[in-house]
Amino acid sequence: MARILVVHSDRSARKLLERHATRHHDVTLTTNIAQGLLSLSKVRPDLIVVGLDAKKKEALELLRQLKYAKTDVPTIVVGAAGAGALQPVAMKLGAAAFIEYPVEQHTFDQAVSKALQQDKDVHGAIPPITEEELQSNISEVESTFNRQMKCFAGKNQVYLQALIHGYNRTTRPRISLKCNLRRQYGQPPNVYYEYIRDVCCDDPGACPAYQEFRARNSA
């Protein structure tokens, strides 16, 4: 479960994004860029979701401010109608992803899981164990994910990981997958619950390593 800061001036869009985000995460809502920037130190979000209007373009200013301040928070841009032409600019300014409004739950979850995983990859960090793992029969989740796995590289590769922590102690078991395809293309091999759920088991075509594999083998 991550802390997500949603910044959007349109009430209906803000409510939709809140509904999507609260399915798995803690959410804070703000109505404009100024409020969003002021909320950073208080909320300390793991991820920002910001709306981009084709005329106002305020989301680009938020990305510029984050880049200027070297505030390393992954940011997903949600483009309104007509904002697609600004996608290259948003990505150049450091957006982790660009998705179009209205966005479906599936697309939102996938974008969030990818952005969080990529952020952990960059920093060599392990995401905290999720509430779903803590509240579930973890062995059943492992079996379910192996059964639902859509990526060929992840077939029967989901396992329970427990790390050594201190003297003669281990961490609580959690869902993990060590992906040789990611390693092959220069990415950290370990992925965890949310990425496995939303990408490996649902849409492996969204995975950068899978995309590179397909591109090289279709040439």
Image (cartoon, rainbow, N blue to C red):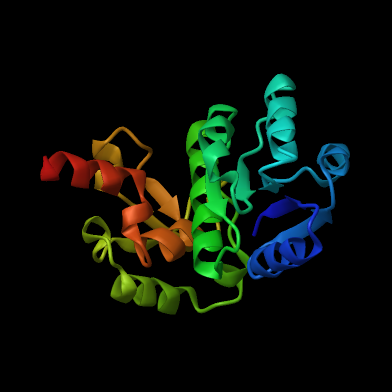
**Whole-percent x, y for residue 37 in the image:** 83, 37
Q: Position of residue 56 (x, y in %)?
A: 75, 40
Q: Quadrant of the N terminus?
A: bottom right
Please provide percent x and percent y for residue 69: 75, 22
Instruction: Say left or right for 40 vs 91.
Output: right
Q: Which residue is pictured at 40% across the width and 59% down the height?
A: 199
In the rendered structure, the answer to whether residue 126 lies left or right of residue 69 reads left
Picture layout, residue 1 above or below residue 92: below
The answer to which quarter of the image holds residue 152 is bottom left
User: Is the residue 211 above or below the residue 156 in the image?
Assistant: above
Going 56% across and 49% down the picture, which residue do you hit?
127
Give the residue at x 78% y 42%: 44
- Whether residue 99 is situated above or below residue 42 in the rendered picture: below
Pick the residue in front: 46 or 208: 208
Of 158 and 181, nearer the camera is 181
Q: In this orientation, does residue 33 appear?
A: yes
Q: Measuring 27% from the left and 36% from the top, which residue is drawn there?
A: 185
x, y percent for residue 123:
54, 32
